[in-house]
Amino acid sequence: MQELETQVVKIQLGDNKQSSSFVYTFAETINSQDTELYVICELPMFNPAAADECQRISQAITSAIKRSYRGEVEAETFENALALINEELSKLVTIGKTHWLGKLNAIIGVKHNDILSVSSVGKISALLYRDGKFVSVTEPGNTNQPLKTFEHFSEGKLKLNDMFVLSTSQLFNHLSVDRIKKLVDKNELPIAAQEIIEILQDDMGPEIACGSIFALQTEPSPEITPDEVDLAEFLNQSPDQQSQSLSPQIKSQIKAGFIPHSVKNYAKTGGILAKSFFADIKDKYLKLSYWRNLANHSGQTIGMVQGKLKSTAKKIQPERINNYSRQKKFFMLAGVGLVLILVVNIAIAKLQNNSTQTVQFNTEQLTEIEKQLNDANASLIFGDETKARELFAQAQNLLNNLGQPESQENIDKVNELKTLAQDLDKKLNKVETATVKNLGTLASSDHLIALPDYIAVENNRTIVSYNRNNGSISDNELSTSESIIQAIALKNADRAAVYNGSELLIWNTETGSVTNGTKDQVPNQSDFGGMKTYAVNNKVYIIDQADAVIRSFATTNTGFTNPQTSVEDQALKNAIDLAIDGNIYFISGGEIYKYNSGDKQDFSPAVKNLSDQSKIYTELDYEYIYLLDPENNKIIVLNKEGGLVKNITSDQFTNLRDFVVDENNDKIYVLNGDQLLQIEL
């Protein structure tokens, strides 16, 4: 089996705040298994808020492939890894995360020893460059069945000088295969990548994202030739004699940049590095600008990996240095010097982006915080919320006690980690930014009137309404002959129940007449806690704070009859709103109470300490309970067991007054001051 090392260049361009697509690029080596993992994911992104969800899907794929290759690698490991990835994607579907189905462009590659395994889905490329030709190595699939997302895969043996390219379609939209071929033939891979980035930056707009991985198969770090040279004799010879005493192989090595030696292990590291860099080390690689430009080109990502330096260095035995001759020490130090030159230059470039060694302790803390936040994110993706909260708490504690770093780079890194922590906190609390549409201006009111064809408010007997059918706002489509404190639609499409501050009335929404009222057991306005109707029995339910009860009133086309007590609870003295879906829910003292057939139910919702301006909404056959939380400018969504589904926020939530939920059409109408907002669920 031919041993190969891989030189990898990872390119990622695009800004998730502006791009129309989200791109995730991953490359990592599992040293213990001699295995390299590669992942590229691309998803459409209609708004910046979708980036987090796209990131979670990409991380789910990456975490699954990494878990699969932690153990011993066998012939079927890649196929089993694909099955695990498909299973994780299926889990996302079961919790309602389906927007990626049929839209995911992704590729997974694994190089183990000299075998490359590749599987892809959607519009994405996997090419092999061999003997001057590019060939496709996989046929992407496309399915709406998550358990078959990655269904087919290809495997093949790599050879020396092979290069495989994994990339989103944007790379080949802006560079032809022939042009890429010319660039990689003419330049070393990092330089070719730099030119590719420059071309893409010139051609692509900010709305375009691109992710690519170039992986070139190179010779392993070579052993220095074992030819022996008597160094003392060699140094005492004239230059001509020295040249004659060297074998042709050693002469060729000197020309290539090797240092002659008699003990191959001692100078091996220096020889390896000299072979790659000696010829032009002064002209190119010792220039700080080269490495800085390569590492930081225009703020984009270029990742380079070339293997086996650590394993080579381990062969040097420092405890034997004292026994070396002067000549041996000289040549060993010469080799080490070359190593140090290269390492220092690479380190300088990397340290421009990170912290300096003088604040290494802070850097280690920052790395640990970042790891904990990433692990918490991964735990959250895979449903372990308890573990995610635990890791988040640890990371937050480290952040809070980190102190103030001195370097600007570390200050920026701390701010970045704080942003990551804030984003994770939002995820743990299931905060989602709403897609909001401002439908227009209604009028000042504390209550919305929800009718089959209208959303309206009443002010001084003028009703300003939004027509759900044509989207118009008018102040003359609906009228009333009475003041309306609160109104709610009844079964009959043209009838609504109206509370005017002292009695219940029937409102004919077509004629505007308000008649057939009753004051029997109807609370005064100062004791009125809210009103809802229940579609099944067409009854109206009212909170009477004075009597600490909820009463129901049977309705007819001509009025109200037979008031009955449905719920008795001293908490109703402070109740502020109610909702009905067969159960009766009401808010009092910041808590939510649940009753069924007059009996209090065990109910421990995930929210506490609601403000006294909060509202609650649900209906028969609705999946969720909705809470308007004006104090915190958000809408809280609970499942019927009281578990938190999400917190909906928006920078347009500035003065929340009331809301109406139309779950069947995935809409929420919100009265924000005098503005009517529409939220897409």
Image (tube, rainbow, N blue to C red):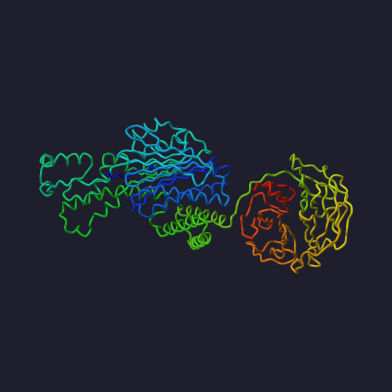
219 with respect to 439 (left or right): left
Front in this rendered view, residue 496 or 501:
496
Whether residue 155 appears in this view of the structure is yes
**513 w.r.t. 612: above or below:** above
Whether residue 400 appears in this view of the structure is no
Q: Residue furthest bottom?
A: 570
Q: Residue furthest right?
A: 516
Give coordinates of residue 107: x percent, y percent.
44, 42
Tally of numbered discs? 0
- Residue at image location 76% in from the left, 51% down from the top: 448
Front in this rendered view, residue 599 or 202:
599
Give coordinates of residue 276: x percent, y percent.
28, 42
Quadrant in which the N terminus appears: top left
336 with respect to 246 (left or right): right
Front in this rendered view, residue 425 or 44:
44
Give coordinates of residue 510: x percent, y percent.
85, 44
Front in this rendered view, residue 420 or 144:
144
312 with respect to 445 (left or right): left
Displayed quadrant of residue 125:
top left
- Residue at image location 73% in from the left, 43% down from the top: 440
Give coordinates of residue 15: x percent, y percent.
51, 43
Displayed quadrant of residue 641:
bottom right
